[in-house]
Image (cartoon, rainbow, N blue to C red):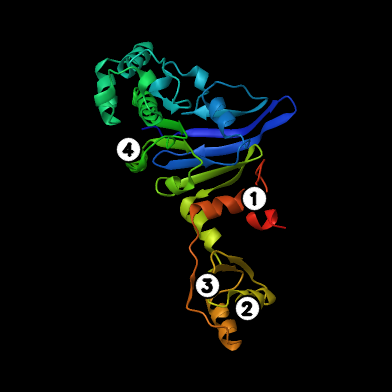
Amino acid sequence: MSAAGIVVAGLRKRYGATQALDGMSFTVRPGLVTGFVGPNGAGKSTTMRVVLGLAAVEEGTALVEGEPYHRLRHPLRHVGSLLDAAAPHPSRSGRNHLLWLAHSQGLAAHRVDQVIEQVGLTPAARRKAGGYSLGMLQRLGIAAALLGDPPIIMLDEPFNGMDPEGIIWMRGFLRSLAGQGRAVLVSSHLMSELQGAADHLVVAGRGKAIADASVADLIAAASRNRVALRTTTLPDATRLLAHAGATVTATGQDTATVAGLSPDRVVRLLNENRVPFSEISAHRATLEDAYLELTHDAAEFRAATPAEVSR
């Protein structure tokens, strides 16, 4: 497999008055699943289209194995992609759709049957794509991405339409692709699924990368100095800990997350003030927690919280 992967550097692009990309830069390395996440309008789809030569930019470069996409003689042998699961012609069977793609890239027909089996689509391969469910279309799109056995895979929202079994399969499948040494870029809104599949995360916001780190590091940062608290006197505990400089966020009728104080400090304060509690533990954030913290100021649209609505 190639050691180059994808290198995105300083991409800038406008659509009229909208700055879609504002210096987007990151690298997708071989042997890793890189999650690409961000609010709507953050520039994810535009970036992926630029990498695949489907959109031009005013500044910056996007290289695949060290070359712009348009210079690749047989692109499917270098990068496989799924951007739109609904792309196949509805009257064409899944197998014929893949045969057409294989022929366009000079690939042998037997490769089609290999990738169909690889994604678990053999029973439906000769059915018309117009009758496929969204999950089946996702599998067909992934099969197309694998046709050229490329060292780079790019998938946009591959978990969409997948049933629970399909989601479990997808997680393992992405891990296996990276385990083969491929560079895998996955755009998704489902943080819980990426947490089980991604090694690295690029968080986009307002046209640029606002975070570029390992999933483990992002979760550790979001978990730091946070304590999970359970108490039957949550209002008293909240007032006490807030007075000591903590930020207390209720997560239930008798549970809260406390930020800004160590577990030992929380225990000491509650004991000294005779505020009862039944549980205190170091809080382990989820990838979704880390994502929401990073993108708090970058979301284009945000609904009011229940507390704000009731005011």
- At 60% from the left and 54% from the top, the residue drawn is 293
Q: Quadrant of the C terminus?
A: bottom right
Residue that mark 4 sits on: 180
The picture places residue 125, in percent across and down from the top left corner, at 28, 21
Residue 13 in sight here:
yes
Mark closer to the chain start, 3 or 4 = 4
Q: Is residue 32 above or below residue 273?
A: above
Picture quadrant where residue 31 is located? top left
Q: Nearer the viewer, residue 167 or 73?
A: 167
For residue 221, the mark is none
Residue type (three-letter) at the residue carrying disc 3: Leu
Does residue 202 lie above or below 50 as drawn?
below
* Numbered tag placed on residue 236 in the rendering: 2
Quarter-wise, where is residue 134 in the image?
Answer: top left
Residue placed under numbered mark 1 in the picture:
296
Q: Measured along the vertical axis of the image, is residue 283 above or below residue 33?
A: below
Q: CA distance from mark 1 to mark 3?
A: 24 Å
Graded by Cα atoms within 10 Å as few (under 14), some (14 to 19) or many (20 or more), the crowding at tag 2 reads some
**Amino acid under label 4?**
Gln
Earlier sequence position, callout 2 versus callout 3: 3
Dot placed on the residue nearer the N-terminal end, 1 or 3: 3
Label 1 vs label 4, nearer the camera: 1
